[in-house]
Amino acid sequence: MEEMKQRILTQGEVLPGHILKVGSFLNQQIDCAFLERMGREVASLFAGCGVTKVLTIESSGIAIAASVGMAMNVPMIFAKKHQTSNVSGRVLSTVIHSYTHGNDYTAVVSAEYLLPGDRVLLVDDFLANGNALEGLIRMVEGAGATVVGAACAIEKGFQHGGDKLRERGYRVESLAIVETMEDDGTVTFRP
Ligand code: G4P
């Protein structure tokens, strides 16, 4: 998506540790008109795939996942990172390792929302090492549902999480794939 690349080039900031800050339009302040266009772009990429639900993990994935859900007219589910009193009954859970934060957390979804027969599109804001998406895949397949594919706003191609999933046969679509990110702020994209 050309607009995503331009936003990254004009509004993104490269932080130490190969972190791309996009707080001005995606991660903290959200450009809602742009968010709507992201949702429609993802919806058009997966049109005709029979998606019945969109799934993400709290918190930063929620906005784009909701936008995709609206554009596809299907429910959006978000996995919680901690079991809370409003996730009750039988739950699907999986432990996910965050490379960026160096910790493990448990993602939880009520089993009543992911059903056998569901065709699920995974959505997230960032795809780095792919651990979050791999955790969501375990949940969906554990529920007897089908992973239709995954869509991300920004993929960090140099961390190879997206490529690992593609090698496993999953369809992964990213609105921009950052190939290199230098400390001087230079960013290049995968064509
Ligand atoms: P992975 O799922 O692809 O393996 O990624 P990883 O665990 O390394 O990422 C951990 C968190 O850091 C995720 O958010 C991810 O969205 C975010 N992240 C990774 N790289 C970048 C980056 O370059 N820029 C920004 N802005 N975020 C990045 P999270 O910890 O789950 O937190 P949140 O969703 O609650 O914000």
Image: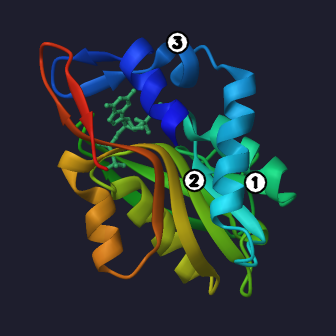
Q: Residues within 10 Å of mark 1 (few under 14, many from 20)?
A: many
User: Label 3 amino acid?
Assistant: Ser
Residue 9 in the image, given as x and y percentages of width and height: 37, 20
Label 1–label 2 contact, CB within 8 A: yes
- Residue at image mark 3: 24
* Location of residue 114 by image quarter: bottom right
Looking at the image, is 175 positioned above or below residue 114?
A: above
- Which mark identifies residue 123? 2
Question: Label 2 neighbourhood size at 10 Å, few (<14), some (14-19), many (20+)?
Answer: many
- Give the vertical position of 186 relative to 82 (above or below): above
Determine the residue positioned at 73% across, 72% down. 51
Secondary element under disc 2, as helix, strand or loop, is strand
Mark 3 burial class by Cα count in 10 Å: few <14, some 14-19, many 20+: some
From this viewpoint, is residue 85 visible?
no
- Which residue: 66% across, 67% down? 46
The answer for how far apart the CA atoms under marks 2 and 3 are is: 20 Å
The mark that comes first in sequence, 3 or 1, is: 3
Q: Is residue 67 visible to the viewer in this orientation of the structure?
A: yes
The amino acid sitting under disc 1 is Met
Q: Position of residue 54 (x, y in %)?
A: 69, 60
